[in-house]
Every structure is written in structure tokens, then in C-alpha cells.
Image (spheres, coloured by chain):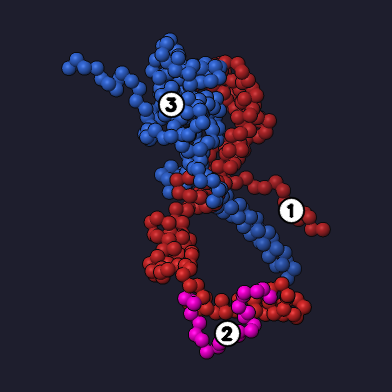
């Protein structure tokens, strides 16, 4: 380390020397020829003298310079952190699963973002409609949301006198929000016979 | 044993209550309570809300207590009415609590509310999000739909029934085709005989 300091000091002195003597115009500036200063140019340093910091600094001290080498443990902890406290390298997540419905990835125990987005949008639309319909009146009946082309389900005794507030959505019921979960056993044959490709230019 | 059954003196919450957390508020405890009252009001009004996990978890207990007391004592009970008046900032919801939620949740054996962990952007905000909802709401379900899992017993049975149905249909179809082909074969056979006869005549 002292070697480095020696080298940098040396180069700095060299540069200072060059600036002082050859400055901008190649002449030593007159202002610097002060009385009482030992002229460096006249008494050129004896090259055989060994350089020592003690000569240079005298009784001075050095600030903000590491005094001791950091141990390898300290350096490794600074670089990689401590496992369990602040582990810096990237760690693989093992709590990710793919959704059974849509196949998107989600964290374990957390709703699937793709499915949740769908439900959230539909919920927001329904909430807006319900709020519009109910307004500020006292709410005394259950709300039933009907989509396009749907009718109120009848009571067990077949009468239609359920006391509910009907909120109608101006769109058909989304397929994924369907109440009919049965699938068709036999598919009906298609009506169309020829399928012409479109958008072929 | 002349002691009263404690569980019958007060409603027991049907959720696990976590320790009180310090929801910081510039207005102190009052502001904190106002925040919780707003949350309970929104829950009763919208029936499904998305908010930060801590706030939802804290407010959930109060919503549960309110509903369970409403079910237990009805709307003729002064203390319950005061409780409802305190927690519901919009007064039309007091009607909803006693006339809609009580009949709906009377026979509910589980908690009256549900809480889910909501997804959040990665890495996004540090705070966890959650969805808090009342049971029996009209919105689409948040739970994954397992009805299509083919290993469930009803799906196994339905699959077998479908197979049987198809087998029957195929058998019918095969019978039909067989009978038709037999008729055709007879026809072809008679035509062939006629042709043979012609040939014989030509020869
Ligand atoms: Zn999904």
C-alpha cells in the first residue's frame, strides 16, 4: 500500500514540477519565484536518496484510510449476505403452481391472477349495476342479477312471488359463469358443410 | 351446576382472530376505528371488496361480530341496534343487515365472511392484498372450479354413464346398418338373378 502511495505521490510531484517550470508558455511563471522558498529547480533532489513517507509527512497523520485488512469471512458476508438473514444471490421460488383452469402460474394459496382478473371485472360491472339500481333507498330485499334472456327462478311451490330486487345486465351471461355445468353427451352434427377461409387477401 | 353456559351468553366468532395490529393512523385510535368502520360498511354494501390484507383481516372480525349479533338478537335489541348504527356509516345498510343478511346467513354453519389472498404484481408493493366477501353474494365464485376434475367420483360415474350411452347408441346404429345392408343385399341379389337370367337368354 505504501508503494502505491509512493508511486502516486511521485507522479503528482512530477506533474507539478512540469507545470511549474514549463507552465503554459514554456517558461517558469515569475510569480512563483518567491523569496525564501527553497527552489526545487536549483537544488534538484538527489536521486540516490531513498524516499520515505516520514520525510514527506513529518508529524502529520493520514485520515480515512483502512488500517487493517478485512477478514475473508467479512468480505464473503458483504458479498453474499448471510443465509437466513439477508441472502443476496437469487433464490428459486418453489411455491409456484399452474392454475387448473387456465394454466397460468400463480403462487400457492393465492388466487390465480388470470382467473381473478376475469371475475373481478365481472364483479365490478355487477356492482355498478346494483348500486345504480338500489341507490340510497333502504335495502330490504335480496338482489338477483339476471343476464340477457334470463327469467327469475320460481319458488318451490311454483309461484313467482319471491320478494327480490331484480338487476338486469344488458349482456348475455359469460360462459364461465354458467350455472349449467353438464356437458353434452352427443354432439349434434353441424349444419354448415363448407367452410371458406377468410382473410386470405 | 347453576352456572350459565358462557358460549350462550355471547356470540363466538367463527374465524380465527389474529392479534391486534397497529394500523397506523394520523388521527390515532379514533381514525383507526373510522377506517375499520368504513371497511365494514363497504363490505356490507358491496359484498365483495379488495383491500390490503391487514385491514381486511382486522375488519373481518367486526363484520362477523355484527352479523352474528344481528342474527342472535334481531332488530328489537337496543344494544345490537346501536352496534349496527356504529359500524354502518350508511344507514340504509342497517335495513340490509337485518332484512337481507340475517335471513340469508341464519342457517350458515360456517363463518359469514370469506377472505382470499389476492394476487399482486411482481415485485410490486410490499403489502399483501386480499379479497373479503360475504357468503351468498350474487357474484361469480372466486374459488377454482373443480367440477371438471375427472377423478372426482361424480365425474367418474358420469363418464361411465356416457360410455354406456354411446355403446347403446353404437349398437343401435350397427343394427340399423346391418338391417339396411341386408335389405340392399336382397335387392342386389334379385337384380343379379335377373341379369343372370338375361345372360342365359342371350346365350
Ligand atoms: Zn387461472
As drawn, is A184 to the left or to the right of B155? right
Can you tell which of label 1 and label 3 is closer to the viewer?
3
Front-most of B1 and A145? B1
Q: Say which residue appears at 37% left-offset and 29% top-offset.
A: B14
**Identity of the residue drawn at 40% across and 55% down:** A85
User: Gap between marks 1 and 3, in whole Å?
Assistant: 60 Å
x and y, in percent, of residue A68 in the image: 41, 69
Residue B122 sits above or below residue B11 on the image: below
In this view, the residue farthest toward the right is A201
Could you say whether the residue bearing mark 2 is in a helix, strand or loop? loop
Helix, strand or loop for disc 1: loop
Q: How many marks?
A: 3
Seen from this angle, which residue lies furthest bottom? A48
**Image: magenta residue range:** A33-55
The answer to whether residue B36 is visible is: no
- Which chain is in red here? A
Please tell me the colour of chain B: blue
**Residue A7 seen anywhere in this rendered image of the structure:** yes
Q: Which mark is residue B143?
A: none
Q: Which mark is residue B62?
A: 3
Q: Is mark 2 within 8 Å of ligand 1?
A: no
Q: Is residue A134 left or right of residue A48?
A: right
Task: Identify the residue under disc 1.
Answer: A195
Alpha carbons under labels 3 and 2: distance apart: 88 Å
Q: Nearer the viewer, residue A37 or A4?
A: A37
Q: Quadrant of the C terminus of chain B?
A: bottom right
Residue that badge 2 annotates = A45
Question: At which x and y percent is residue B10?
Answer: 33, 20
Image quarter hosting the N terminus of chain B: top left
**To which chain does the residue with label 3 belong?**
B
Q: Nearer the viewer, mark 1 or mark 2?
A: 2
Q: Residues within 10 Å of mark 1 (few under 14, many from 20)?
A: few
Amino acid at each position: 500500500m505504501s508503494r502505491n502511495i509512493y508511486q502516486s505521490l511521485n507522479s503528482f510531484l512530477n506533474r507539478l514540477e512540469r507545470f511549474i517550470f514549463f507552465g503554459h508558455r514554456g517558461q517558469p511563471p515569475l510569480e512563483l519565484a518567491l523569496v525564501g522558498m527553497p527552489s526545487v529547480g536549483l537544488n534538484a533532489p538527489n536521486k540516490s536518496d531513498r524516499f520515505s513517507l516520514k520525510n514527506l509527512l513529518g508529524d502529520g497523520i493520514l485520515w480515512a484510510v483502512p488500517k487493517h485488512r478485512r477478514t475473508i469471512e467479512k468480505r464473503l458476508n458483504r458479498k453474499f449476505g448471510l443465509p437466513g438473514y439477508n441472502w443476496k444471490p437469487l433464490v428459486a421460488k418453489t411455491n409456484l403452481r399452474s392454475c387448473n383452469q387456465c394454466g397460468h402460474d400463480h403462487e400457492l394459496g393465492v388466487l390465480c391472477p388470470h382467473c381473478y382478473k376475469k371475475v373481478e371485472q365481472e364483479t365490478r360491472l355487477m356492482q355498478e349495476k346494483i348500486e345504480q339500481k338500489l341507490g340510497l333507498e333502504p335495502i330490504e330485499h335480496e338482489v338477483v342479477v339476471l343476464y340477457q334472456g334470463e327469467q327469475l327462478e320460481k319458488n318451490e311451490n311454483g309461484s313467482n312471488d319471491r320478494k327480490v330486487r331484480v338487476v338486469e345486465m344488458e349482456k348475455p351471461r359469460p360462459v364461465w359463469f354458467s350455472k349449467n355445468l353438464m356437458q353434452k353427451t352427443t354432439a349434434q352434427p353441424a349444419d354448415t358443410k363448407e367452410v371458406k377461409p377468410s382473410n386470405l387477401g | 351446576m347453576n352456572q350459565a353456559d358462557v358460549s350462550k351468553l355471547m356470540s363466538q366468532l367463527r374465524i380465527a382472530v389474529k392479534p391486534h395490529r397497529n394500523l397506523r393512523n394520523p388521527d390515532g385510535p379514533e381514525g383507526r376505528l373510522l377506517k375499520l368502520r368504513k371497511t365494514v360498511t363497504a363490505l356490507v354494501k358491496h359484498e365483495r371488496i379488495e383491500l390490503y390484507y391487514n385491514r381486511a383481516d382486522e375488519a373481518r372480525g367486526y363484520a362477523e361480530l355484527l352479523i352474528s349479533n344481528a342474527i342472535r338478537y334481531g332488530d328489537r335489541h337496543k344494544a345490537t341496534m346501536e352496534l349496527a348504527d356504529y359500524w354502518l356509516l350508511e344507514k340504509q345498510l342497517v335495513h340490509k343487515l337485518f332484512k337481507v343478511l340475517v335471513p340469508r346467513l341464519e342457517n350458515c354453519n360456517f363463518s359469514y365472511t370469506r377472505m382470499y389472498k389476492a394476487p399482486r404484481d411482481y415485485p410490486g408493493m410490499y403489502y399483501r392484498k386480499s379479497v373479503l366477501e360475504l357468503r351468498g353474494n350474487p357474484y361469480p365464485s372466486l374459488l377454482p372450479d373443480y367440477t371438471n376434475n375427472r377423478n372426482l367420483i361424480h365425474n367418474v360415474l358420469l363418464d361411465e354413464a356416457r360410455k354406456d350411452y354411446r355403446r347403446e347408441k353404437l349398437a343401435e346404429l350397427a343394427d340399423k346398418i346391418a338391417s339396411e345392408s341386408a335389405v340392399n343385399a336382397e335387392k342386389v341379389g334379385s337384380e343379379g338373378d335377373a341379369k343372370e337370367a338375361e345372360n342365359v337368354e342371350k346365350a
